[in-house]
Amino acid sequence: MNRFLKFVHKEFLHILRDKVTMLILFAMPIVMTVLFSYAVSSEVRNINTAVYAPGRDYLSSQIIEEFCAHKYFSVKRVVDSPSELKTVFDDGEISLVLVFDNNFAENAARSKAQIQILTDGTEANSAAMYANYAQGVINGFISRYNHLDESAPVVSVSVRMLYNPSGKSEYNFVPGVIGLMLLLINAMMSSVAIVREKERGTMEMLLASPLPPLQIILAKTVPYFSISSVITVMILLFARFVLGVPVAGSIMLLVSLCLIYVFLALSLGILISTLVKSQLAAMLISGMMLMIPTMLLSGMMFPIESMPAILQWISSVVPARWFIAALRKVMIQGADITLIAKELSVLVGMTAFILAAAVKKFNVRIDI
Amino acid sequence: MRGGFVPKLLVMMPVMMICVFPFAANQEVKNLKYSVVDNDRSQSSAMLIHKISSSAYFTLSGFYESFDGALRSVEQSEADVILEIPQDFERNLVLKNPQSVMLTANGVNGMKSSLAVSYMQGIAADFVGGMLSAQMPASEANINIELKPYYLFNPRLDYKVFMVPALTVMLLTLVCGFLPAFNIVGEKEKGTIEQINVTPVSRLAFILSKLIPYWLIGFFVLTFALFLAWLVYGLLPAGGFLTVYLSAAVYITVVSGLGLIISNYASTMQQAMFLIFFFMLIFILMSGLFTPVSSMPKWAQAITTFNPLKYFVEIMRMIYLKGSGLNGVATRLLSLALFSAVLNIWAVISYKKTE
């Protein structure tokens, strides 16, 4: 036990001496959490709109007024000729164009008028949203206009938003960002640390020492685990007090969940380190190859239910998916342990599996 | 190249990115689950529920006797929305008494829940309108307007088309920006760089000798990615291959410059790794690749003007979707050239200083 502690102590010193890395390790997650919680969103903020209404009649003017008054829309430009419509999206300022036909008011009253809603399909994600909102505004106008004589609608729909009454997008994204950061930082740290020893040839020295391999591995990870814990707490504090994301559930549960996940990430890093020979490869796998599936398939940015079945299946292998789901439940919904039982057991199971594989691979290496 | 691992990675990554991820990366809200607490159990309430279930957006998760039961389903993530139909729903409908149905949504995902709510409201309004108009003739003063949304350049709003050009950006950034940086820092760490400094080889020649292999690899990877995009999706750059390669060439110099700067400031691979990871993540997430720049707050949008990835993503999308040739992408290309100049000058200066 004494030897073990000495090992841990030595590892700690190694890490602490590298001031640049320390700075990055502590400053980076904070900066990124803040940045991405605000930057990574699909919220509709300001839809810059242009209008083409050749008739300039009372009806089209009223509809345009609706858009001017709407908080999401900003009518910035009036298009004067149809040929301008081809180039209106080119400079990237305008996101949506309303095109009223000639004789708009007359057609609307007598037969049928038409409004074309043009959006830039190259931004497919936002184009559909903007068009939907625009249709909502116009439809709202139409039903109000047509029912001016009648009494209030017979059936109204009252809405209540649970957990997030003001609909802030941070609530959804912050747990995702935390999941990404914790996974990548820990996996990268541990994988590179071990491989570095291999590369420098100091691994043989370690293995010649009286400690069993498993303890060597653990000795390497304990310092990173402690550092990670501090970073995790920092991120959570930041999320709570600076970003305003609540912690509705029990703090103990929250912290335990995070620590399990950190341990999983560290184990993943260890496993990676047993599979590669160079620091470069370790970094590439733990950095790039973990990052991409985590960003795309974990549910942090793109809803899992919208994916084709096979990708949903693959997503269940991505550890971040379970962590982020559980974190959302605990932080925002205030869930208790029974509600995240499934996620917790998956995470623990994954950790055990990864660690077992890592130890096995580690032993195999030594025999060779 | 040494280490059979990196070439394997360079083949696998494009395949993975281009074939799998465009299917995943979209923001469409589908398959919303809803629970129902039907206090009326009348024909009308059944019709309303049927109408909701048969829409493309919603799947019925279950019927519950009380709100608390339904709430549990939301907590278990089995439902996103709860619909409560009040008692006497049908009766009040017939008597035209004002009444309301209650929607409770899981607000964690703000966009999902607000879309769920607006879809539900739309369906409910449709339902009521259908019942009412059956009883009342259309008024003379009503206006009749037809709405036609058009999605220019991408009429079917094909998300895959949207993503593919953007994903090639990530590949180029990785191969030509960061791999050379690692290479150089790796040499620094091993100390072999000192040996080079003693030789008569000029610094410029040294750097170029490091970069050029990666540039070539970058072009190979790009060509491979373009080929895959054509093979799997039938996508061709409408704006022409020349524009693609020219833009890629400029972009490559930008990321190489960035990689060089980092390699100057980092003394170990680990430091380089974290620095690069830091920049890469920021660049990718703030480039408009996954989430639109217009959704960011103003200060974040201002930051994106300094992100070279953003310009290249726009260029690639314009070439593939709008068919923009050199004319169309000229301004953005010039911005990239400016980035390249600034970054490479900085790289040269910082190289001299750290020696």
Image (spheres, helix red, strand yellow):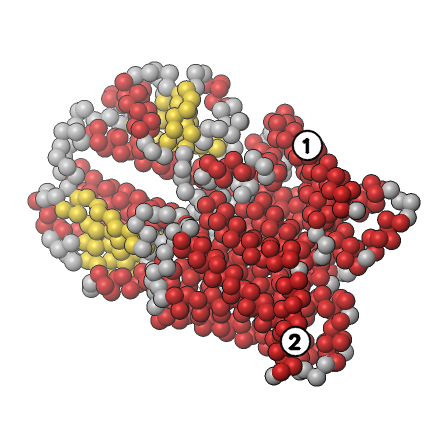
Which amino acid, mark 1? Ala
Say which mark, if any, is on residue B83: none
Residue B154 screen position, x and y as percent: 51, 36
Which amino acid, mark 2? Phe
**Residue B126 falls left or right of residue B217:** left
What residue would you read off at disc 1? B337
Chain for mark 1? B
Residue A89 screen position, x and y as percent: 50, 27
Give neighbour class at mark 2: few <14, some 14-19, many 20+ (Cα, 10 Å). Answer: many
Q: Residue at x 38, y 63 (%)?
A: A330
What residue would you read off at disc 2? A7
Figure check: B245 above or below A181? above
Q: Assign a secondary structure to mark 1.
A: helix
Which corner quadrant holds the C terminus of chain A?
bottom right
Q: Label 2 near label 1: C-beta < 8 Å?
A: no
* Residue B191 visible somewhere in the drawing: yes
Tell me the distance, in whole angstroms, between the alpha carbons under discs 1 and 2.
51 Å
